[in-house]
Amino acid sequence: MSTTDAKQSPPQDDVHLIVAQDEEITIAHHPEDWLAFILFWSLAFIVFLQFFTRYVLNDSLAWTEEIARYGLMWIVFIGGAMVTRRNSHIAVELLANVMKPGPLRAALLALVDFIKLAFIGLLAYVSVAITERMDMQRMTVFDLPMSYVYGGVAFGCFLMLIRQLQNLWRNARAGWKKPDDITHQIAVD
């Protein structure tokens, strides 16, 4: 190979069109994460058991469908607490994203935090009222009150309320300053 050939073609090892760097992963242990993990895999086992007994054994267990429905209710609201902790609920952030950092933007972000707190507080209050009323109604397969099922919903709502209070406190201490870059808006647990 001559020296002119070496000058014309760059070495192949130095050409990188896309450079990706992995972020450091931190695993946090929060009670709602573990509870959702246990509920999820219990629910997966119950649904598999329902499928197996219905389609393989041709003799379905009566309780699996009802318990799967109730487990899904629990996991949705426990998962809601996880999402609230991460502050990653679906939101329309267009106005806050186009505003320049300053007192008006901070006031908007504070208003949004207080509205979320009020809504989750109302949700927790209503969930307790429903739980109390469902004490008279019984489950179809098991002779247990439906308040056990709705108690999980109320528990998840109160976990969301606690996590939103923590978000509000953290954001208030930071002065409701939101990072300008969308990639830096994900809160680390």
Image: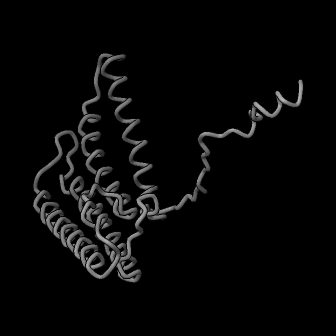
**Is 140 located above or below residue 96 in the figure?**
above
Q: What colour-coding does the image apply?
A: one colour
Q: Dividing the image into 4 quarters, which one contains the N terminus?
A: top right
| Residue drawn where x is 10% and y is 56% of the image | 136
| Residue drawn where x is 29% and y is 63% of the image | 155
| Residue drawn where x is 60% and y is 50% of the image | 22
Which residue is at the far front?
4
| Image location (x, y in percent) of residue 185 | 42, 63
**Looking at this view, is 156 or 171 the one in front?**
171
Horizontally, residue 106 falls left or right of residue 22, namely left
**Is 169 located above or below residue 178 in the figure?**
below
The part of the image, by quadrant, that contains residue 132 is bottom left
The number of numbered badges drawn on the structure is: 0
| Image location (x, y in percent) of residue 20 | 60, 46
| Image location (x, y in percent) of residue 55 | 32, 17
Horizontally, residue 164 falls left or right of residue 38, namely left
Which residue is at the far right?
2
The part of the image, by quadrant, that contains residue 35 is bottom left
The part of the image, by quadrant, that contains residue 119 is bottom left
| Image location (x, y in percent) of residue 82 | 38, 59
**Is 69 located above or below residue 162 in the figure?**
above
**Looking at this view, is 60 or 8 the one in front?**
8
| Residue drawn where x is 19% and y is 72% of the image | 118
